[in-house]
Image (tube, rainbow, N blue to C red):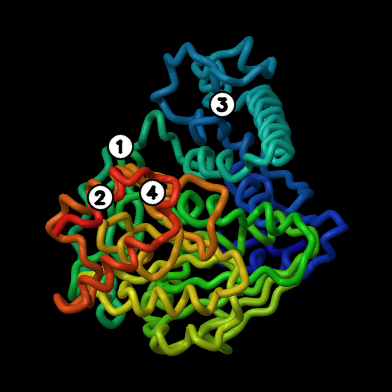
Amino acid sequence: GGLAVGESAAVREAQLDAVVPLLPPDRPRYLMGLGSPGDLLEAIQRGVDLFDCIWPNAVARHGLAVSSLGRVDLRRGVYARAEVPIDARCACDVCQRHSRAFLHHLVRAEEPLAWTLIATHNVHFVLALMREARTALDAGRFPQFYRAHRGTLDAPDAENPPTSPRPARVRRPLQRGVWSLVERPGWKGGPAFRAVRHDPSGEVMHGVVPPDDEADALYVGPMGVVEAARSDGPPWVVWDVGLGAATTAMAIVRAWEAASTGRVLHLISFERDLDPLRLALDHHDHFPRLRHPGPRALLRAGAFDGTNVRWTLRLGDARAALHDAPVPDAIAWDPFSTDVDAPMWTVEVLRAVRMRCAGRVTSLHTYARATPVRTALLAAGWFVGPGPASGPKEETTQAWSEAPDAPLLGEAFLRKWAASSARWPAGTAPADRDAVRDALRRHPQWSGLDAGAREALERP
């Protein structure tokens, strides 16, 4: 008790991120004094189970109602002739029998019945929201439920804004070192979001699809994080190559903590510049997954130890740090592109990584889909297949250290490789091209193809 009184939402949520993981997992987590729909949703997302608060009744005394589209201030004259219910989706008696216009009249007349009716609706709405949240949790789709509602439930009079929004002021980008915080338009009409940009190159980390969504789609799902967390076994080791603003790492940590039944995750992040993470943490209101004790512990001490998560940082050139890191079960290969960070995409580095995984079936997942990247992986001995789509990319790339039970690139890739004028991996000198071609020719991935399909590898 006493937390949700006076401090900002960001401070409260940071405190929940720090405290809830430390509480016994077999006991209900109770937070006193929290009652607005949006705040409830944020607390549920952080692992809180139980609440009590006078908020739904208290705000009713001021003519404030809640709805699926945000708050409705029934004192305002805009509702004097609004012959519609508070919320068309609500099944409470108030919404079935009374209009906003009638409730507005009662409020302006200072009739106590107004408070009773609005409070009745507010309590009904909050209870219905909690039922929907429980259903979403039981069905394993609470993250989607949370993302669908978090931006609307506490919005003030979204249907009838009090004033026309002012044009946004043009401000200098928020910066730290060579990194800036920039606003990106939503993909295909989705909401705009913030991302971190590398100013010298102009490249943006997760700059097309919202970072959290892309991390879930490209890494958490394909890696099988949830399935691994729910299984028995020794610590599951993941390499996060390219920590950046910790988007991918935190997606993995959050998914593991939500799903683990006791198995330990050992996450190893490789990075040489921590300014992107510091910049994102300075503005964590734009990066809600960072409201967790892990990132700050990583910056402060180079490691975070949670109940079932050990997260360590390897600071410096990843090419040197990869050689003695624990052998991974899965790899998020997320350095910058070959234009900016070409040494990380060479055949030599990818071969060294695969050799490090000898004796273990390791999967590698990356946002890249370019022919030179896939060629480098194949020449390094990886088995390579298509990964999930991401924004305008119809597919990304997945690879395995040993032959997997999964779709692999085949004849279509070989035809594309033969026709490409830019097919050679980063760092491949003209004198080394025959060796790359020979490595492709010998790759067992093509064993199921007929000789005609493999002829593409012989073309100059």
State the residue in front, 104 or 426. 426
Q: Which residue is mark 2?
A: 455
**Mark found first going from the N terminus, 3 or 4:** 3
**Mark found first going from the N terminus, 2 or 1:** 1
Quadrant of the rendering where the C terminus is positioned: bottom left
What's the residue type where badge 1 is placed?
A: Gly
Q: Nearer the viewer, mark 1 or mark 3?
A: 1
Quarter of the image where one finds residue 25: bottom right
State the residue in front, 342 or 440. 440
Name the residue at 33% across, 42% down. 394
Q: Which residue is mark 3?
A: 107
On screen, residue 432 versus residue 71, left or right, reads left
Above or below, 208 relative to 97: below
- For the residues bearing labels 3 and 4, Cβ distance under 8 angstroms: no
State the residue in front, 145 or 69. 145
Name the residue at 33% across, 74% down. 347
What's the residue type where badge 4 is placed?
A: Leu
- For the residues bearing labels 2 and 1, Cβ distance under 8 angstroms: no
**Mark found first going from the N terminus, 1 or 4:** 1
